[in-house]
Amino acid sequence: MTTILKITEDDFESAVDIASTFLKSGGTIIYPTDTVYGIGGDATSGIVVKEILKIKKIKEPRPLSIMVSDASMVEYYCETGIWEDMILNKYLPGPYTFILKKRRPLPASQTEKIGVRYPESVFCQALCRKFGRPIITTSANISGNDSPVTFDQIDKKILNNVKIAIDGGPTKYQAASLIVDLVDRTVLRSGGEAISLIELPEY
């Protein structure tokens, strides 16, 4: 049975504590970001990665993005230089996913690169700080279906496969994050009307 926790930005400490404790036990959660509702788990656990792919009905290994708490966590897991740091400092926190080279192995991605998010969400930021490790952030949907931007839009098949689900109301941007590959310097996915394409500064 899924436990649903309702939060507001002004009252979320209990939800943060419960979600963090559950993540530390190897559990998976559904939670609101600034863009869409996501499925989260310990990005350093191969078992958790496999569970989330199973929930989304993804049969083959596929890279999953991670949510981080701050720049130091990015630096620990990813390779960045002056140019990358300038972009990250300018646009994060925000509705973006930036693809970076991995500095060390992470089960969330089997490739040399990893998608990194630092959402414009007080809840997400507090959860990452409390958990102390990167959290998987992938849309809470069956692969190929629409990404939910309200709690009511989450597919019941997805909801029933997690023990903890956090209802934070409608997401801020109501659209998936814009994805920018900072390794190949390309925009891989644009966001909704509320998210403008960013202009990459000259290298």
Image (spheres, rainbow, N blue to C red):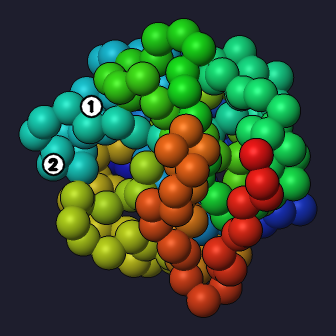
Residue kind at label 2, given as amino acid type: Lys
Q: Position of residue 3 (x, y in %)?
A: 47, 49
Is 67 drawn above or below residue 181 in the view shown? Answer: above
Q: Upstream in the sequence, badge 1 or badge 2?
A: 1
Q: In this orientation, does residue 132 appear?
A: no
Element type at marker 1?
Answer: helix
Q: Is residue 136 above or below residue 58?
A: above
Please give the name of the residue rendered at 29% of the width and 68% of the height, measured from the top-left corner.
155
Q: Which mark is residue 7?
A: none
Q: CA distance from mark 1 to mark 2?
A: 10 Å
Residue at figure coordinates x 54%, y 27% from the top left: 101
Say which residue label 1 marks. Answer: 51
Q: Give percent across and percent down for residue 189.
A: 46, 66
Residue positioned most to the top? 104
Percent across and percent down for residue 107 are: 39, 19
Q: Position of residue 152 (x, y in %)?
A: 43, 77
The amino acid type of the residue labelled 1 equals Glu
